[in-house]
Image: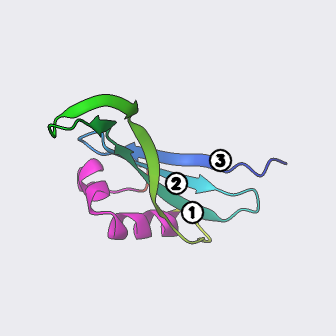
Amino acid sequence: MSDDPQVVEAADSRDGFKQWRLLRRSHGLYFYEEKTLEEEVHLIEEDGSEGAVVADAYWTATHVSGLFDTSEAARVDAVATLPWLRDAFGNAETNGS
């Protein structure tokens, strides 16, 4: 059995700068993670203007939860913890139904 977690559910913020994934570990417990899109990194020229791109835009982990016994408990905690996620779900029920 792989140690890689299985994606159970996912959502993106309306502006496209946040991602959320609900995952199930091989031992049966659940957790979630939030990633944020970081903008390109530019050199700053001597005159203060933006120079060449030194790093493309990239995703970085900005929140990782603890472990939960059920996917529903993890989902409820995620919605309470990440305000943008409520908006992404359109204030609808988040149980996948």
Q: Is residue 53 left or right of residue 9?
A: left
Percent x, y of residue 44: 25, 39
Q: Is residue 24 left or right of residue 89?
A: right
**Which amino acid, by three-letter code, is at mark 3?**
Gln
- Determine the image quadrant of residue 58: top left
**Which amino acid, by three-letter code, is at mark 1?**
Phe
Closer to us: 40 or 16? 40
Report the residue marked by disc 1: 31
Q: Is residue 68 above or below residue 7?
A: below
Q: Is residue 32 above or below residue 36?
A: below
**Which amino acid, by three-letter code, is at mark 2?**
Leu
- The chosen color scheme is rainbow
Q: Secondary structure at mark 2?
A: strand
Mark with earlier residue (2, 1): 2
User: Residue pushed farthest right?
Assistant: 1
Report the residue marked by disc 3: 6
Mark 3–mark 2 Cα distance, whole angstroms, equals 8 Å
Magenta stretch?
72-94
Report the residue marked by disc 2: 22
- Determine the image quadrant of residue 23: bottom right
Q: Residues within 10 Å of mark 1 (few under 14, many from 20)?
A: many
Q: Is residue 89 above or below residue 27?
A: above
Residues under numbered marks 2 and 1 in contact, where contact means CB atoms less than 8 Å apart: yes
Percent x, y of residue 42: 31, 36
Mark 3–mark 1 Cα distance, whole angstroms, equals 10 Å
